[in-house]
């Protein structure tokens, strides 16, 4: 069913499969940055880290070492402050928010752990608030210690509810790093050399107008959405379509009609629609759930990353009422699935989002940031597009080497962000970032873009 790109869409993006994710832990610029900015104590700690941890792409060996994190700022072991527009998407309300710390402290003093056969007030309250806010009627929830595990629960529930095992997902997608998650994921850096993967894991091209494999050209005809329906019709027995509502690695924001077509196609062919919002829910796009911008009801939503308030590992699977069919099986059954400590942090997160008006703030500041970046980069060669949704902003460049150069220039100036799909600068600040810091960061990126590539 899928076009010829077993390594994903990396080749179409002009980046080899080893660079599809962007932030790889090797290369001359990385070494040069370390030579210029690391002190002896940091080098010794990094050497210890590299000695004891298994090495893997994009983490160990590490770039630098941290000693502190507060609000939008990190502090490295040499005392340098770094504005964090990356944060692995766990910091929608910044690092160490006082409300989160207070809630966690209270939980630690009263109920630090809850064995599985018991429930507890923080878990029940967080479940209620998420289900009542979910964009599908009668939602129910399961918690898990991480987004990858929550994706696994969604896949199991889809099989159980439909009696089918096949899935349809997107090349270039990221749904986690476990074997089931990389089977439906589409990034070569996670899949290559790992097979065989889960049977029935079919892939299709994602929504990506700049690199459309269907030849839509300058005017998107959403042939990628039509191809999903074609595959559902041809296969006839797909359990679920799983898709990132907004792909955070390069900030692809489909139009409303894309999801209307997917929802209709799933309904016609008996497939469930699972939306992965692990890095983008909870206000990142200006909505509590990114799907709210599209006006459809998914069958399941997977949350994670920031759900634990930026401090605790916590993820959730939200499913519509009709999918409450797993009484006789264990969909998750994780040791920490109703962690009172993590759920207390999650409740504090929801309180802060509401009390500080962060949904509206994300939308407002996102619009201002897009306008500012477009003005700053209008005459800059090599900038393909500036796009965004709330405070998730992507600057696509025409050259992966240029993207890497910009990243290390900004790191030298004290700004950290992600490079996705090899050539997209992805800015994801905390939703409560100080406006002065936000616009300093935008100016920092613009300066780095104007510098010669070789510098």
Image (tube, grey):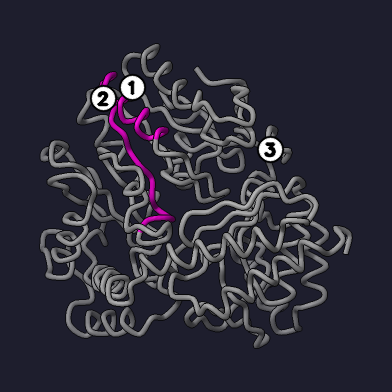
Q: Is residue 412 visible?
A: yes
Q: Residues within 10 Å of mark 1 (few under 14, many from 20)?
A: many
Do labels 2 and 3 touch, CB within 8 Å? no
Compare residues 251 and 24 and report the one nearer the observer. 251
* Residue placed furthest toward the top: 234
Picture coordinates of residue 426 (x, y %)?
59, 57
Picture coordinates of residue 298 (x, y %)?
28, 39
Q: Name the residue tied to disc 3.
A: 13
Q: Name the residue tied to disc 2.
A: 267
Q: Which residues are magenta?
A: 257-281
In this rendering, the answer to whether 75 lies above or below 202 is below
Compare residues 124 and 298 and report the one nearer the observer. 298
Q: Earlier in the sequence, mark 2 or mark 1?
A: 1
Residue 258 on the magenta span: yes
24 relative to 101 in the view: left or right: right
* Residue at image point 74% right, 66% down: 408
**Secondary structure under the numbered disc 3 in the rendered image:** loop
In this rendering, the answer to whether 249 lies above or below 162 is below
In this rendering, the answer to whether 250 lies above or below 105 is above
Res. 447 image quadrant: bottom right
In space, the residues marked 2 and 1 are separated at their CA atoms by 12 Å
67 relative to 63 in the view: left or right: left
Which mark, by number, is residue 238? 1
């Amino acid at each position: 069913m899928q076009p010829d790109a077993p390594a994903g869409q990396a080749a179409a993006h002009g980046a080899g499969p080893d660079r599809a994710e962007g932030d790889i832990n090797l290369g001359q610029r990385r070494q040069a940055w370390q030579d210029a900015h690391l002190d002896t104590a940091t080098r010794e700690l990094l050497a210890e880290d590299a000695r004891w941890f298994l090495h893997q792409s994009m983490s160990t060996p590490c770039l630098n070492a941290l000693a502190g994190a507060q609000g939008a700022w990190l502090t490295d072991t040499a005392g340098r402050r770094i504005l964090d527009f990356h944060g692995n998407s766990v910091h929608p309300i910044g690092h160490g928010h006082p409300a989160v710390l207070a809630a966690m402290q209270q939980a630690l003093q009263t109920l630090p752990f809850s064995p599985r056969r018991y429930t507890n007030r923080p878990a029940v309250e967080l479940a209620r608030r998420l289900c009542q806010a979910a964009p599908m009627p009668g939602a129910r929830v399961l918690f898990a210690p991480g987004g990858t595990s929550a994706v696994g629960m969604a896949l199991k529930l889809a099989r159980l509810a439909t009696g089918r095992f096949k899935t349809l997902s997107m090349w270039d997608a990221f749904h986690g790093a476990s074997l089931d998650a990389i089977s439906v994921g589409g990034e070569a850096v996670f899949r290559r050399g790992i097979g065989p993967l889960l049977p029935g894991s079919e892939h299709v091209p994602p929504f990506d107008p700049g690199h459309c494999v269907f030849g839509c050209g300058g005017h998107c005809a959403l042939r990628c959405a039509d191809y999903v329906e074609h595959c559902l019709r041809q296969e006839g027995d797909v359990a679920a379509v799983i898709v990132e509502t907004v792909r955070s690695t390069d900030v692809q924001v489909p139009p409303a009609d894309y999801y209307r077509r997917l929802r209709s196609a799933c309904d016609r062919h008996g497939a469930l629609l699972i939306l992965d919002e692990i890095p983008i829910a909870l206000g990142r796009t200006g909505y509590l759930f990114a799907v709210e911008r599209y006006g459809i009801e998914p069958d399941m939503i997977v949350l994670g990353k920031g759900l634990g308030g930026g401090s605790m590992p916590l993820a959730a699977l939200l499913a519509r009422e009709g999918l409450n069919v797993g009484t006789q099986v264990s969909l998750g059954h994780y040791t920490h699935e109703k962690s009172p400590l993590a759920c207390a942090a999650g409740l504090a997160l929801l309180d802060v989002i509401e009390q500080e008006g962060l949904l509206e703030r994300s939308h407002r500041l996102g619009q201002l940031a897009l306008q500012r970046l477009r003005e700053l980069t209008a005459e800059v060669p090599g900038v393909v597009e500036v796009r965004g949704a709330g405070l998730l902003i992507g600057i696509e460049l025409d050259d992966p080497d240029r993207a890497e150069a910009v990243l290390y220039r900004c790191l030298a100036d004290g700004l950290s962000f992600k490079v996705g799909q090899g050539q997209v600068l992805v800015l994801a600040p905390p939703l409560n970032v100080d406006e002065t810091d936000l616009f300093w960061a935008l100016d920092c990126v613009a300066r780095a873009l104007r510098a010669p590539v070789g510098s």
